Image (spheres, rainbow, N blue to C red):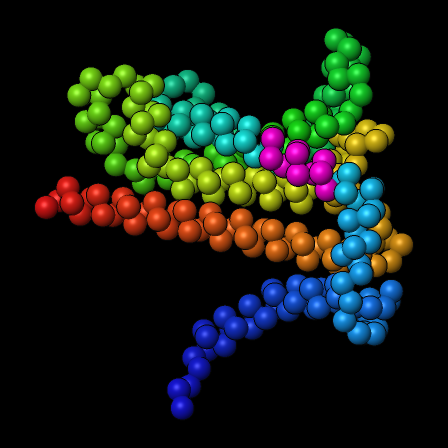
Amino acid sequence: MRKLSFSSVMLWCGLVFLYLPMLILVIYSFNESRLVTVWAGFSTKWYGELFEDPQLMSAVWMSLRIAFGSACMAVILGTIAAFVMVRFRRFPGKTAFSSMMTAPLVMPDVITGLSLLLLFVAMAQMIGWPADRGFLTIWIAHTTFCMAYVAVVVSSRLREMDISVEEAAMDLGATPLKTFFLITIPIIAPALVAGWLLAFTLSLDDLVIASFVSGPGSTTLPMVVFSSVRLGVTPKINALATLIILTVSIVAFIAWYMAHRSEKRQRTMASNAGE
């Protein structure tokens, strides 16, 4: 019988520690009883009640719209910032620019949320915008801190990229803009997808910053779940969490499959070019 090594045991312990709570949550989402700790039989009624709850459905829809918009804008701005940090190696203030781009990674959410709230209040007093805090202010706040994560992921990919490919394209007559869209973007596409997924997840999961920059009538999903949990966890929340886990797992698998296919295609093209 093959003996398990110490590293294998620690790996399995870590996986159990991470995924056992999620497995228990999924199991109890099918609980017949209203009490989440008392098993009273299999039932899917909480999923039906979940879709009939207008407050939860409204919060889910708003969080998904904010997460999608924040992830898209964060990828655009983060990619531009990463390209500037990696390709433009010498310009005044580069160190300060790089530090400011990565600062949101270590900044506490409370500080980020409070500073954005003060900014929005000051702008409302000076220029009258934003008159109300809601979808737009949450979207701006999430884009601000998600952009830093995207910049780090994309800049790592840009540093590993062979710059001679871009130089060869420009030697053949391509403009820098055409080279960026036809050569650079396809090569760093896996990093863009990873950055988008990371930004989408961070935005969907954010509670603290959204609490600062939201107003009346603009409640995100984490805010609804947090306020519900304070009164006691219900199986309906378990059903909602199960659907989120399932959705995230499917999206992560699709992203992994696309990245795997892209890397395999690049290795094949490199092998054919070598022959």
Task: Say if the magenta span includes residue 34.
Answer: no
**Residue 189 drawn at (x, y percent):** 39, 37
Along the horizontal axis of the image, is 237 left or right of 262?
Answer: right
Q: Is residue 115 left or right of residue 106?
A: right
* x, y percent for residue 234: 83, 59
In this view, the residue farthest toward the right is: 231
Residue drawn at point x = 80 percent, y = 21 percent: 132
Depicted 133 relative to depicted 66: above or below: above
Measured as percent of width and height from the top left, residue 259 is found at 39, 47
Pick the residue in front: 47 or 168: 47
Residue 232, position in %: x, y?
87, 58
Which image quadrant is residue 146 in? top right
Magenta span: 60-69
Among all residues in the image, which is located at the extreme top?
Answer: 127
Tell me if residue 210 comes above or below residue 16 in the rendering. Answer: above
Quarter occupied by the N terminus: bottom left
For residue 68: magenta? yes
Q: Residue furthest bottom?
A: 1
Residue in front for this viewpoint, 239 or 126: 239
Question: Which image quadrant is residue 89 in?
Answer: top left
Residue found 15% across the figure and 41% down from its top: 273
- Residue 86 falls left or right of residue 52: left
In this rendering, position of residue 41 left or right of residue 15:
right
